[in-house]
Amino acid sequence: MSGATVLIVDDERTLARAIKGFLAEYGYEAEVAGDAESALAQLERLRPDVVFADVRLPGMNGIELLRRIREFDAAIPVIIMTAHGTIEGAVEAVKLGAFDYLKKPVDLEELKLLADRAREHSQLKQELSYYRRQAGRGETPDAGLAGVLGRSPAMRAVLDQARQIAQLDETPPVLITGETGTGKGLVARTIHATGARAGQPFIEVNCTALPATLMEAELFGHERGAFTDAKESKLGLFEAGEGGFLFLDEVGDIELALQGKLLRAIEDRTVRRVGGIRDRKVDVRILAATNRDLERETQRDRFRKDLYFRLAVLPLRLPPLRERGDDVLILAEHFLQRFSAKYGRPVPQMDAPARELLLAYPWPGNVRELSHVMERAVLWSRGDTIGVDHLSLTAPAESAPPASEGIPVLPPPGVDLGGWEKAMLERALADAGGNQTRAAQRLGITRDTLRYRLKKHGLQG
Ligand SMILES: Nc1ncnc2c1ncn2[C@@H]1O[C@H](COP(=O)(O)OP(=O)(O)OP(=O)(O)O)[C@@H](O)[C@H]1O
Ligand SMILES: [Mg+2]
């Protein structure tokens, strides 16, 4: 517990000092103020994580102090201390926004538990605002409501569905599918930003990033002591999304080991922290995205069927850019404006051959690829009309790089990397007559890595 600051406001010096000493043993830095006025004077400098204030103080009382602290920063948890017989004051304090109250004579253990809880709570608030900021970042500034561009019939249909989904407050999970760069992330954020829960959290998790054990703690939180590093309890992303959305990006990458727990959390709307014993109710809407064919993954036993059916109640399929007709040009113009503004240049025009090329190109990287191409074009055209040369797109047939220097040629419709990996593992094992050491050598990986991957693909118990 490093460096949390507690401010104790009490005119009983002995008691205040006892609290200070006790909390210090747990790594809290405590400061004492003898009255409300000097407490207020110290707020700016101290920025306490928790305040304990006696109700009865000389001069301004504890309730008034509570009000003033909340004006200063409503996120600071204030705990009011009351002597026997003044419970009414305590109740009023809680109504006015006190975090909790504590009866005098003070039980130090109880006080410490309250301090822990209050601190965890204010940390949570900070994390939430962090996630909110994260969520708003990285997208185009114009990406708010009208940020998803497209007038083609294929896009209109999807945007219509997205709008309806956004307007509902209660819906089953939504599964957004589509090739890479088709705008799954953008659509998820737009559903949040334009819907009834816009002011509530939008928590985004990339499911590729973490192995199952860490992911579980991240999603569901953990109690103190749940594992070696768990020095404090931590709330999970489900809880952090309370009232808002949880966006499970790349949900197809969630390890099988965790899929059952995820399903349970979604079905029962409860989570249990790692190392915890009770289920907590959560009210969070689930958005999930993947560029994999999850149905096929279920047939290969790499994704649980029940979870898939649960997630796919409301599917939103984003069409690839090559199926969106003239949307390519609308988007290209949009990116031209954006990047011209970014580099402080006049917005260039595109000539007819350039437009035709944009329409003919198959866009394997979809909208993201288009935005990169237009950014480059803005830089290379130097304000002139944009021609085919500025787009630096090779004709589709020649677009695959030569298979030299170990760079593999990818088949045009894309690859199923997981499938390839599994097939190569099977092949290497078969060639090695089932000998894992030799199979690992053959693949240029360690035996541990081989085992891990075999397990991942369910090739070995
Ligand atoms: N219809 C659209 N209108 C405007 N911008 C778009 C549109 N679709 C995508 N974009 C932009 O293209 C980029 C890629 O979109 P996004 O990251 O949402 O794709 P994705 O489907 O999540 O990709 P991946 O599968 O690789 O995660 C983003 O900068 C996004 O703002
Ligand atoms: Mg994405």
Image (spheres, rainbow, N blue to C red):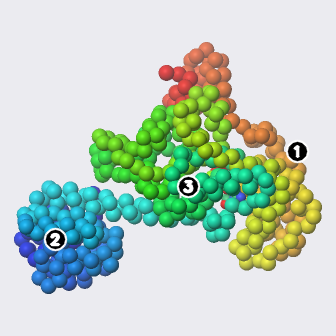
Distance, label 1 to label 2, CA atoms, is 78 Å
Which residue is more in the foreground, 19 or 103? 103
Looking at the image, which residue is at 63% across and 44% down?
315
- State the image coordinates of residue 87 (x, y, percent, origin top left): 13, 66
Along the polypeptide, which appears first: circle 3 or circle 2?
2
Q: What secondary structure is marked by label 3? A: loop
Q: Is mark 3 within 8 Å of ligand 1?
A: no
Residue hosting label 2: 89
Q: Which residue sits furthest right? A: 353
Looking at the image, can residue 321 be seen? no
Looking at the image, which residue is at 46% across and 51% down?
284
- State the image coordinates of residue 356 (x, y, percent, origin top left): 90, 58
Looking at the image, which residue is at 67% across and 65% down?
146
Q: Which of marks 1 and 2 is in front?
A: 2
Q: Which of marks 3 and 2 is in front?
A: 3
Residue type pointed to by label 1: Ala
Looking at the image, can residue 425 be seen? yes
Residue type pointed to by label 2: Gly
Residue hosting label 1: 397
| Mark 3 Cα-neighbour bin, 10 Å: few <14, some 14–19, many ≥20 | few
Picture quadrant where residue 326 is located: bottom right
The answer to whether 243 appears left or right of 442 in the picture is left
Along the polypeptide, which appears first: circle 1 or circle 2?
2
Residue hosting label 3: 168
Q: Nearer the viewer, mark 3 or mark 1?
A: 3
- The quadrant where ligand 1 appears is bottom right
